[in-house]
C-alpha cells in the first residue's frame, strides 16, 4: 500500500497542476462578473463619458476628430459622432443627411434651442450629450424627441421647468445632468418620467425633500449624487425606502448602502 501511494503522488500532483490554471481562470471570470456589474452602472452614471475612458485605455490616443471629419463620417453611415471643438447651429446645419446616426456628443456645444430642435431630423438618434450652456428652452426642444433614451447635460443651466418637460419623454432611461438652478421640485417632476432607470445629478442643490421624490421613481435602478445639500439622515431614509437602488454619493458608495462593494470608481 505504501508503494502504491508513492506511485500515485506524481499523478496527484499532475492533476492538481492541471486544475490550478482552470481554477485561476474561474476565479478571474467570477471577479470580472462582479466588477462588470458595477462598471455597467458606472457607465450609466457617467453616460457620455465612455469616450474619455476609451481614450485613457490607449497609450497613444488618436488626435480629436474635427467637426468636418465627424460630419463626413455621419453622412457616410456612422452611427455616432464625438466632437471636442465648438459646434454651432450653422455647422450642424451642414449635416443634412445622417439616417443611421444614433449618438451625438458635443463637448463644446454652442447650439441654440433652435439648433437642438434641428436634431429631430435624425430619425435614429437616441443618445445626446451637450456640454455647455443648456437651459430650459434647450430641454423643451429635447422633449420633442420621443426616441431619446440617453441624455447627458453636464455644466448646464436648466431649471425645474426644464426637467418637467423632460419627464414627458416616453423612452428616457438615463439622465445625467448638472445645474445650480434645479431644485427639489425638479426631482418631483421626474417621478412622472415613465422609463427612467439611471439618474446622475452633479452639483445640483437638492435637499432631503428631493431625495424623498427620488425614492418615488419606481423604475429607477441607479442613483448617483455628486454635490448636493442632502444630509446623511436623508440619504439613510432613501436607502431604507429603496434598498434596491445602486447608490453612489460624491463618487463612492454610501456607507449604509446594502448593495455597496469595493471597486476602483
Image (tube, rainbow, N blue to C red):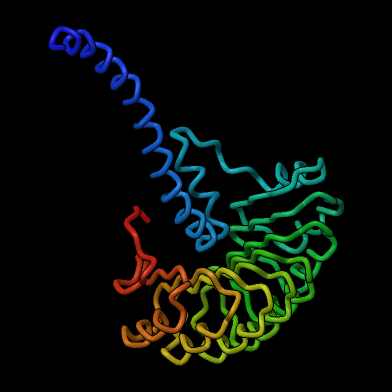
Name, please, the residue furthest toward the front.
Answer: 1
Q: Is residue 261 above or below residue 155?
A: above
Q: Position of residue 241 (x, y in %)?
A: 44, 84
Q: Foreground: 24 or 156?
A: 24
Q: Is residue 155 visible?
A: no
Q: Quadrant of residue 190?
A: bottom right
Q: Foreground: 116 or 172?
A: 172
Q: Quadrant of residue 165?
A: bottom right
Q: Foreground: 190 or 67?
A: 190
Q: Foreground: 188 or 178?
A: 188
Give the side of residue 118 with respect to residue 236, left or right: right
Q: Is residue 10 above or below residue 234?
A: above
Name, please, the residue furthest toward the left.
Answer: 2
Give the side of residue 157 with respect to residue 95, left or right: left
Q: Quadrant of residue 217?
A: bottom right
Q: Residue shown at 66%/85% (left/top)?
A: 192
Looking at the rendered structure, the number of numbered marks drawn on it comes to: 0
Q: Position of residue 228 (x, y in %)?
A: 40, 81
Give the side of residue 185 with respect to residue 242, left or right: right
Q: Is residue 218 visible?
A: yes
Looking at the rendered image, the quarter that the C terminus falls into is bottom left
Q: Position of residue 237 (x, y in %)?
A: 38, 86
Q: Residue shown at 34%/20% (left/top)?
A: 18
Looking at the rendered image, the quarter that the N terminus falls into is top left
Q: Position of residue 100 (x, y in %)?
A: 81, 49
Give the side of residue 198 with respect to residue 103, left or right: left
Q: Residue shown at 60%/81% (left/top)?
A: 158
Amino acid at each position: 500500500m505504501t508503494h502504491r501511494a508513492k506511485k500515485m503522488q506524481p499523478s496527484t500532483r499532475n492533476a492538481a497542476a492541471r486544475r490550478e490554471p482552470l481554477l485561476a481562470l474561474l476565479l478571474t471570470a467570477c471577479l470580472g462578473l462582479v466588477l462588470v456589474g458595477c462598471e455597467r452602472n458606472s457607465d450609466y452614471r457617467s453616460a457620455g463619458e465612455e469616450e474619455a475612458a476609451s481614450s485613457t485605455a490607449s497609450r497613444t490616443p488618436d488626435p480629436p476628430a474635427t467637426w468636418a471629419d465627424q460630419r463626413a463620417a455621419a453622412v457616410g453611415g456612422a452611427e455616432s459622432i464625438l466632437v471636442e471643438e465648438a459646434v454651432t447651429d450653422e455647422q450642424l446645419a451642414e449635416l443634412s443627411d445622417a439616417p443611421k446616426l444614433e449618438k451625438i456628443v458635443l463637448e463644446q456645444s454652442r447650439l441654440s434651442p433652435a439648433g437642438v430642435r434641428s436634431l429631430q431630423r435624425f430619425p435614429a438618434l437616441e443618445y445626446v450629450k451637450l456640454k455647455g450652456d443648456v437651459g430650459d428652452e434647450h430641454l423643451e426642444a429635447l422633449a420633442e424627441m420621443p426616441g431619446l433614451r440617453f441624455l447627458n447635460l453636464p455644466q448646464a443651466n436648466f431649471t425645474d421647468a426644464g426637467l418637467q418637460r423632460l419627464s414627458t419623454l416616453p423612452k428616457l432611461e438615463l439622465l445625467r445632468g448638472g445645474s445650480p438652478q434645479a431644485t427639489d421640485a425638479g426631482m418631483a417632476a421626474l417621478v412622472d418620467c415613465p422609463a427612467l432607470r439611471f439618474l446622475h445629478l452633479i452639483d445640483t442643490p437638492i435637499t432631503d425633500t428631493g431625495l424623498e421624490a427620488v425614492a418615488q421613481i419606481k423604475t429607477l435602478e441607479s442613483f448617483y449624487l455628486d454635490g448636493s445639500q442632502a444630509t446623511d439622515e436623508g440619504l439613510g431614509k432613501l436607502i431604507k425606502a429603496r434598498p434596491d437602488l445602486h447608490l453612489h454619493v460624491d463618487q463612492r458608495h454610501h456607507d449604509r448602502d446594502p448593495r455597496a462593494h469595493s471597486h476602483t470608481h
